[in-house]
Image (cartoon, rainbow, N blue to C red):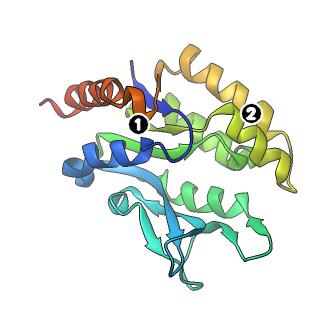
Amino acid sequence: MRHLFLEGPVQEGKSTLIRRLIAPFLNQIGGFGSQRLLDGTGATVGFRITPAAEAVNLTREYDRGLSNIFLHFDGSRVVKTPEVFAEATLRYLTDFNGKKLILLDEIGGMELSVPAFRETLYQVLAGGIPCIGVLKLEEKNRHMCEQAVIDKSCLTWHQRLKTDMTERFDAELVPFSRSIKAEAERSVRTFLNQIFDQ
């Protein structure tokens, strides 16, 4: 197994688990994470991309001046910009000098409709550095793609990516939910121990 990705329902704790376990190794990790943006009441109003070095910060208060916001709820509608996700992640998927692990958290959504992102993602998965992250569930991806006014090909690309992960890139897709959290945590710990020789 070269890569490990968690799959499961939203807001069950997938990213929280991964980021808690990789925290001691952040200086050896490249890639990116997704950060939830909150308003003054604690409600989610958007998401942005951050480099892996900032991955421990799962949430942040929303500020209009923040960079790399790819999804925002403006009160009346959801503004989705997959090209912002793709452009930001491409910057974080080019320099892995000295890194032992790549964080890809999370992938498998509307960004797959951007050819440059797909090409770079496949290069990373085919490369020599292990990856860890979250893969969106197909049901969640279908909802996002059908609701978004974007290229609906992200549904097809999600299915192809999931197949390629296991058949071409030797990735383990670990089911995750609160009820099986302990089992998923064991899988992640084992994977990280192999990489960081603990």
The residue type indicated by label 1 comes to Ile
**Position of residue 177 in the picture relative to residue 64 (left or right):** left
Residue 44 seen anywhere in this rendered image of the structure? yes
The quadrant of the image that shows the C terminus is: top left
Q: Nearer the viewer, residue 66 or 13?
A: 13
- Residue 156 point in image, percent of width and height: 79, 31
Disc 2: CA contacts within 10 A as few (<14), some (14-19) or many (>=20): some
Above or below 156: residue 48: below
Q: Reply above or below: 65 against 4.
A: below
- Please give the residue where the numbered disc 1 appears in the rendered image: 132
Instruction: Give the CA separation, mark 1 to mark 2.
Output: 19 Å
| For residue 180, above or below residue 20 | above
**Badge 1 vs badge 2, beta-carbon distance below 8 Å:** no
Label 2, secondary structure: give it.
helix
Residue at 50% of width from left, 82% of height from top? 40
Residue picked out by circle 2: 157
What amino acid is labelled 2 in the image? Trp
Residue 131 lies in quadrant: top left
Q: Earlier in the sequence, mark 1 or mark 2?
A: 1
Location of residue 173 in the rendering, given as x and y in whole percent from the top left corner: 49, 23
